[in-house]
Image (tube, grey):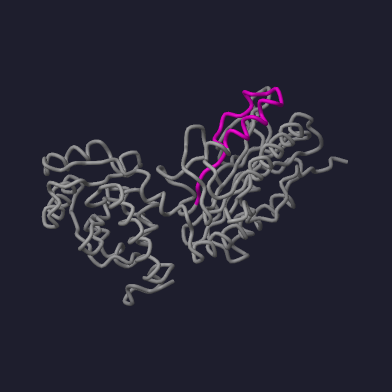
Amino acid sequence: MNEMSSAIPQTGVPFPPAEYERRQKKVLDAAATAGLDALLVTALGHARYLTGYYGGGSYFGPFPLILTPGHAPTYVVREYEAETVRAYSCVREIVPYTQERDFAKVCADILRQYGLQNKRIGLELRCWNITPSDVKKLEAELPGLTIVDATELVGSVAAVKSELELDAMRNAIAMTEVALSTFRETLRQDVTETEMSAAMQAAVRKAGGEELRVVSLVFGERTRLAHGLPADHPIGCNEPAVTEIGGTKFGYAAGLVRTAVIGRNPEVESLLSLSNEALDTAIDMIKPGVAAEEVDATVRKVIERSGRPRAFRNKTGYQTGIHWSERGNMDIVPGVKDVLKAGMTLHMPIMLFGERGHIIGCSDHLLVTERGAKSLTSTPRTLHRVDTE
């Protein structure tokens, strides 16, 4: 960690100050291109990308990061959290508010001080950490303000990773692979989801990793849950096991989906084969300049040709990075014309519904290079089968 607050041990930011300055400058350049005079960043993943602060205190109310030319980045935060924000971020200009009801007035005072009261301000209106009420209160304080939806602006910059970020992603996926190795080794008839989760978490801790994100871990009939958290449920003979997990490093997460079965299950085997075929087709197409919607269309064509068009009800993939993903980041779905760029990282989970609603599939985590897609993992996507004999 690059320590920013020497008086508090084990605090600081993961990357050198120059890395955050580079990100902030690129975001300001993008804001200028979009015709914005300032940007208020409230999405936790986007703010962490720009400052290093993990966002733990902002459940209480919005913590807007104000970016505008000619002024230092300014964080408006709850007073109770101010020292924590200072300790875990690269931002030195921190302005506190006391209670949630004070947020709009304090934020408006800063915007007024910076001469922005009648300017065009970008807000992340489709992200989680700002509400319609917050926006209305800010508009009431500054009636001359023009608010523009800038939900996708930071994500478009954060999509292309620096080498420091790619090192974090590689570290994260190494821990994902540790957990998946444990998944394969631990799977046996009658083991429960909670026992499996505990084994994977322990293996990652032993390997020196940070927290393992368990997005889904389900056995048997519970594979009908799209994002099922582990329960005290055992796996039986001829039943599937599906997990979506991700190691983390400095907040960067690298997820993978894998499927296994105890014994035999023809439908699981068929669905996973189709998932792999569709994923291979998508990977072959990925390169700089290709639109997200084109990659998605190739997957849907493979599924349609299989005669099971209703099997695929998910997105083909999405841009990854801090906090796994964030609203406003690029999705690989119909209608998204954003083009892929070298340096992007993508999670591609091809999840398919069976006749009785069981959701089976696999994924890859990819780096877009000038030559095409490069997998960040060496863990095979093939079905892991546990013999019952």
In the drawing, does residue 74 fall left or right of residue 160? left
As for residue 200 lying within the magenta part, the answer is no
Q: Which residues are magenta?
A: 296-320
Q: Which residue is most to the bottom?
A: 6
Please indicate whether residue 323 sits to the left or right of residue 56 in the image: right
**With 6 as the anchor, is 323 left or right in this view?**
right
Give x and y (percent) for residue 112.
11, 53
Residue appearing at x 34%, y 64% in the figure: 89
User: Which residue is at the far front?
Assistant: 289
Residue drawn at x 69%, y 33% is 220
Looking at the rendering, which quadrant does residue 212 occupy? bottom right
Placement of the C terminus among the 4 image quadrants: top right
Q: How many marks?
A: 0
Q: Quadrant of residue 172?
A: bottom right
User: In the rendered view of the protein, which quadrant contains the N terminus?
Assistant: bottom left
Identity of the residue drawn at 84% across and 40% down: 388
Observer-nearest of 210 and 4: 4
Magenta region includes residue 297: yes
- Residue at horizontal 52 percent and vertical 35 percent from the top: 333
Viewer-nearest residue: 10 or 193: 10
x, y percent for residue 77: 24, 55
Q: Is residue 77 above or below residue 6?
A: above
Return the residue nearer the eye: 320 or 88.
Answer: 320
Looking at the picture, how far across and down is residue 206, in whole percent?
A: 62, 64
Q: Report x, y in % for residue 269.
A: 76, 34
